[in-house]
Image (cartoon, rainbow, N blue to C red):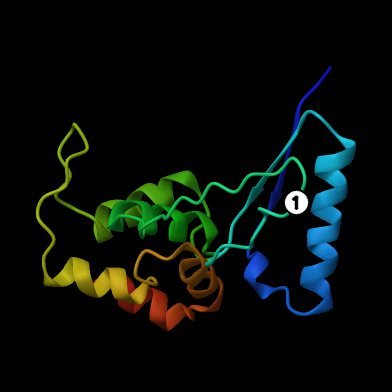
Amino acid sequence: QSKSLLVFERIEALEGSDAQDFHFFLGQIFTDTKDVHVMITSKKSIGLSPLVGAGENIYELGPLTLRNTVKLFAFLCPRVHSPHERKELLEVLVPGVDTKGHAEAADERSYKINAILGGGIPAKTFSIAYQMSSEEFEELKRV
């Protein structure tokens, strides 16, 4: 017997009858299956307590570190084409990391880069990565 994990992201975007239909759908999953787990990302609780067999565990996540924000950006950005280019961009934007991965204290440049790339919020970084022009990308590397 196998187990399954269903992942639903940004559920807060569902409103009205769509939200009700989603709750009904989840209720059916929890009633009709035994080895299915559900992970939902949302900016707020979605109120699963009335559903049979469901429990809601809320984990508040903070923003990504600058290093992880740059890694995500480099992975998503269509202007970065290879693993080598991703590594170079990381070295340019996040210098000062020792061999054990410990970053030095954040400075004004780090704060500026972090702000440009969405402040550590993955959804913002995703959007910025795809919308950034060539000129903006070159400017980012010179910050």
Location of the N terminus (image quadrant): top right
Q: Quadrant of residue 64?
A: bottom left
Q: What element does badge 1 sit on? A: loop
Residue at position x 63%, y 70% from top? 12
Left or right of 130 in this view: 97: left
Left or right of 134 in this view: 96: left
Q: Quadrant of residue 114?
A: bottom left
**Can residue 64 be seen from the camera position used here?**
yes
Residue at position x 59%, y 48% from top? 56
Residue 33, percent across and down?
86, 34
Depth order, front residue of 6/66:
6
Residue at position x 13%, y 60% from top? 106
- On screen, residue 27 above or below 23: above
- On screen, residue 59 above or below 19: above
- On screen, residue 58 above or below 11: above
Residue at position x 67%, y 65% from top? 11
Q: Quadrant of residue 118?
A: bottom left
Location of the C terminus (image quadrant): bottom left
Depth order, front residue of 57/40:
57
Instruction: Residue type at mark 1: give it.
Output: Leu
**Can residue 143 be seen from the camera position used here?**
no
Residue 138, percent across and down?
36, 75
Depth order, front residue of 67/29:
29
